[in-house]
């Protein structure tokens, strides 16, 4: 009984034990690259939207809500510019359930895309799931007549309250929450800095290369 053998050129047969580990390592790194931490947006606006009528005398819009997941790292609000005055801007402030300011940013209406939600990103808030946060919108200067249109949904949900200067309104502000996410949940779940993730990926890649090199040397011998 004869066993079939695959004959390769001598030069290629010498390089093969080295090429295989490199190709495998490249494949592993490529796969891990696609699993790096990323952001995902939770859509809080599955219902029809209606404009919020904001009198000029109103100083602020406040929306309380409950965070659905950990690693809360951003919020996106539906704001449509409506012939804003030059320099008009909206001050976006987010507070946690202890009253601490998570972020305070100014959004210039001149740069707002009418077809998109305005996203405000910040350092991920760890262990945020189930906690109550308060989103506050107010004119950075002047009044609301400066050209900002906001939207709401006609729905009622526990922990979600919409206020115009302290007076509760019907519905919920049109907004979305953003979370740090990755399919590599066992390695990265939003609770570790990106440097730790990079270190873990490097260790995995080096281990794969060493194992492949050892396998190649065994084949060569």
Image: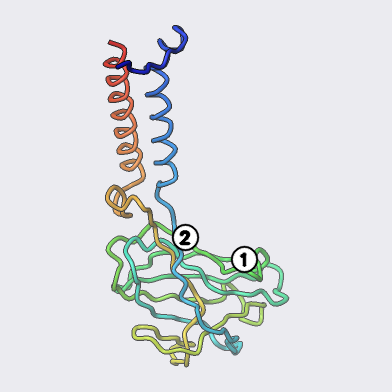
Residue 116, compared with residue 203, is above or below; it is below
Residue at screen point 43% across, 59% down: 122
The residue that label 2 is drawn on is 121
Residue at screen point 57% across, 88% down: 57
Residue 195, compared with residue 221, is above or below; it is below
Residue 46 rendering spot, x and y as whole percentages = 50, 79
Residue at screen point 26% across, 16% down: 218
The circle on residue 108 is 1
Residue 141 rendering spot, x and y as whole percentages = 59, 73
How many C-alpha atoms fall within 10 Å of the one at disc 2: few (<14), some, or many (≥20)?
some
The part of the image, by quadrant, that contains residue 177 is bottom left
Quarter of the picture holding the N terminus:
top left
| Kind of element beneath mark 1 | strand
How many C-alpha atoms fall within 10 Å of the one at disc 1: few (<14), some, or many (≥20)?
some
* Residue 56 placement, left or right of 4: right
Quarter of the picture holding the C terminus:
top left
Residue 96 rendering spot, x and y as whole percentages = 34, 71
Which label sits in the foreground, 1 or 2? 2
Proximity of marks 1 and 2: CB atoms separated by less than 8 Å:
no
Closer to the camera in the image, 166 or 112:
112
Closer to the camera in the image, 165 or 151:
151
| Kind of element beneath mark 2 | strand
Residue 80 rendering spot, x and y as whole percentages = 64, 75
Residue at screen point 51% across, 79% down: 174
Residue 5, compared with residue 55, is above or below; it is above
Residue 93, compared with residue 37, is above or below; it is below
């Amino acid at each position: 009984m004869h066993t079939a053998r695959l004959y390769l050129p001598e030069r290629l047969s010498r390089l093969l034990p080295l090429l295989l580990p490199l190709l495998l390592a490249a494949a592993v790194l490529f796969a891990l690259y696609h699993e790096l931490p990323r952001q995902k947006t939770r859509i809080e606006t599955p219902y029809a939207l209606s404009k919020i009528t904001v009198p000029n005398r109103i100083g602020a819009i406040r929306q309380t809500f409950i965070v659905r997941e950990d690693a809360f790292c951003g919020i996106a609000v539906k704001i449509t510019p409506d012939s804003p005055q030059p320099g008009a801007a909206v001050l976006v402030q987010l507070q946690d359930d202890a009253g601490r300011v998570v972020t305070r940013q100014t959004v210039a209406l001149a740069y707002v895309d009418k077809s998109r939600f305005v996203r405000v990103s910040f350092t991920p808030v760890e262990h945020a799931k189930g906690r109550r946060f308060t989103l506050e919108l107010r004119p950075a200067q002047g009044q609301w007549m400066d050209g900002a249109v906001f939207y709401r949904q006609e729905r009622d949900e526990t922990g979600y309250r919409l206020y115009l200067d302290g007076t509760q309104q019907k519905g919920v502000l049109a907004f979305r929450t953003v979370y740090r996410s990755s399919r590599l949940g066992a390695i990265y779940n939003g609770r570790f800095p990106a440097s730790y993730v990079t270190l873990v990926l490097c260790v995995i890649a080096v281990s794969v290369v060493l194992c492949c090199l050892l396998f190649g040397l065994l084949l060569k011998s």
